[in-house]
């Protein structure tokens, strides 16, 4: 017994040391020569234009600023594709120098990631060493992705279900990437109607209203500018590294709506699951809905799989789970290291890989007679 406890403490200590080193590595990467190649540069360029009173979605102006920052890659302009609700979150980047802005953005993302990991494991600290095996979160941090904001919002929602107003406010942050939760939203709406959970809806609407008013205050024409910019981007014809895009381009490459089919089928299955469930626990079932949403999303990238983390942490902290997460991370990282391209067919199966390994670990846990309800969220 003593040896097991000592091993548990040692694993937690090693995990904390490795996480700290990884954080320092992200800081170094984002605040030196690498940040012009990361998504941070498009947030910075848009924020710079916003601070000067210009169109933050102007492709020509964004490209010019990105080239001044050192982003020299050819192809379509590296434009921020988040709706104007994101403007209040990135506006501060437009005032300091490029190097300081990169440091502030890295710090902001790391703080959100740290709080997310703490909330997801606060009642089960023995699972914190699992975080070092989860590659998608490292990708999201390394490339300065706003997916980290969604992970924070989802984690706060899952941990604050007894405070519906706070949970609703937290969920309002997810509107900066609403397409990543297409399976989650319908079930939540039905649950709010069924439970008469008006405070959660109120919290969400208050947060959404605040983001909307701030976006209009920063740029009254932002929504019209965003609509024009997205029409010029040609997103519907772009291949994305997810299973929905892979199915569409393999079967019906000219029909953009086909990418919605997996999510729509999942919505039907999720509503049926909700109706048949004897006891619906959002800290458990909600985490699975978020994972299904991002895996089947019509528009997603590999680093968006950071939202699978809450679902993975619903599994018992066994040696098999560590092996599962390590193998899944390797199968995610190696194709990218080989191709060095995000939007490639091998990367499209990363979500399926994580879903498959989750199912394997769940089956192993069930056969070991571990209670189904054991979860990492509190």
Image (spheres, helix red, strand yellow):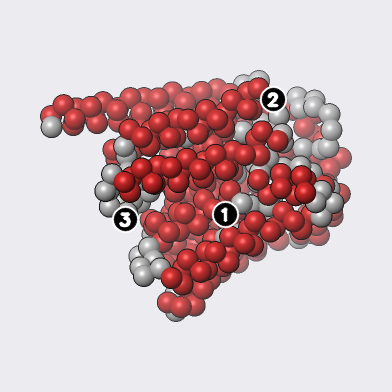
Along the horizontal axis of the image, is 247 left or right of 76? left
- How packed is label 2: few (under 14 Cα within 10 Å), some, or many (20 or more)? few
**To which residue does mark 3 refer?**
373
Numbered disc 2: secondary structure: helix
| Residue 304 placement: quadrant | top right
Q: What residue appears at the point 65 percent right and 56 percent down from the top-left corner?
A: 262
| Residue 35 placement: quadrant | top right
Along the horizontal axis of the image, is 229 left or right of 111? right
Nearest to N terminus: mark 3 or mark 1: 1
**To which residue does mark 2 refer?**
339
Percent across and percent down for residue 371 are 28, 52
Percent across and percent down for residue 73 are 80, 27
Percent across and percent down for residue 76 are 83, 37
- How packed is label 3: few (under 14 Cα within 10 Å), some, or many (20 or more)? few
Position of 186 relative to 90 (above/below): below
Q: Residue furthest left?
A: 2
Residue 200 appears anywhere in the view: no
Position of 85 relative to 28 (above/below): below
Q: Is there CB contact under 8 Å for labels 2 and 1? A: no
Residue 255 appears anywhere in the view: yes
Q: Is there CB contact under 8 Å for labels 3 and 1? A: no
**To which residue does mark 1 refer?**
293
User: How far is the residue under mark 3 from the one under mark 1?
Assistant: 21 Å
Q: What residue appears at the point 52 percent right and 64 percent down from the top-left corner?
A: 270
Q: What residue appears at the point 13 percent right and 32 percent down from the top-left corner?
A: 1
Along the horizontal axis of the image, is 22 left or right of 43? left
Numbered disc 1: secondary structure: helix
């Amino acid at each position: 017994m003593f040896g097991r406890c000592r091993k548990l403490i040692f694993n937690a200590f090693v995990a904390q040391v490795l996480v700290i080193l990884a954080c320092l590595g992200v800081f170094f990467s984002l605040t030196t020569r690498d940040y012009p190649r990361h998504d941070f540069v498009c947030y910075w360029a848009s924020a710079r234009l916003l601070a000067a009173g210009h169109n933050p979605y102007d492709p020509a102006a964004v490209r010019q600023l990105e080239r001044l920052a050192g982003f020299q890659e050819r192809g379509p302009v590296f434009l921020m594709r988040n709706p104007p609700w994101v403007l209040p979150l990135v506006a501060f980047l437009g005032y300091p120098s490029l190097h300081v802005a990169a440091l502030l953005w890295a710090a902001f993302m790391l703080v959100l990631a740290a709080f997310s990991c703490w909330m997801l494991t606060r009642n089960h600290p023995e699972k914190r060493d699992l975080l070092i095996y989860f590659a998608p979160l490292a990708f999201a941090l390394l490339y300065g992705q706003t997916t980290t904001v969604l992970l924070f919002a989802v984690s706060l929602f899952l941990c604050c279900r007894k405070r519906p107003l706070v949970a609703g406010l937290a969920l309002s942050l997810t509107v900066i990437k609403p397409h990543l939760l297409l399976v989650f939203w319908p079930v939540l709406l039905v649950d709010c109607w069924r439970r008469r959970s008006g405070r959660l809806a109120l919290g969400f609407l208050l947060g959404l209203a605040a983001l909307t008013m701030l976006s209009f205050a920063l740029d009254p024409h932002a929504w019209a500018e965003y609509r024009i910019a997205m029409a010029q981007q040609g997103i519907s014809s772009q291949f994305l590294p997810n299973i929905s895009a892979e199915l569409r381009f393999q079967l019906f490459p000219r029909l953009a709506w086909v990418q919605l089919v997996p999510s729509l089928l999942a919505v039907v299955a999720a509503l049926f699951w909700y109706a048949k469930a004897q006891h619906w626990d959002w800290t458990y079932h909600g985490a699975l809905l978020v994972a299904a949403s991002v895996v089947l999303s019509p528009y997603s990238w590999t680093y968006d799989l950071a939202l699978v983390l809450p679902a993975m942490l619903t599994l018992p902290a066994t040696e098999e789970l560590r092996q599962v997460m390590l193998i899944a991370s390797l199968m995610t990282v190696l194709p990218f290291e080989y191709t060095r391209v995000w939007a490639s067919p091998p990367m499209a199966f990363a979500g399926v890989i994580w879903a498959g390994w989750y199912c394997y670990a769940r089956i192993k846990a069930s056969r070991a007679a571990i209670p189904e309800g054991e979860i990492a969220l509190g």
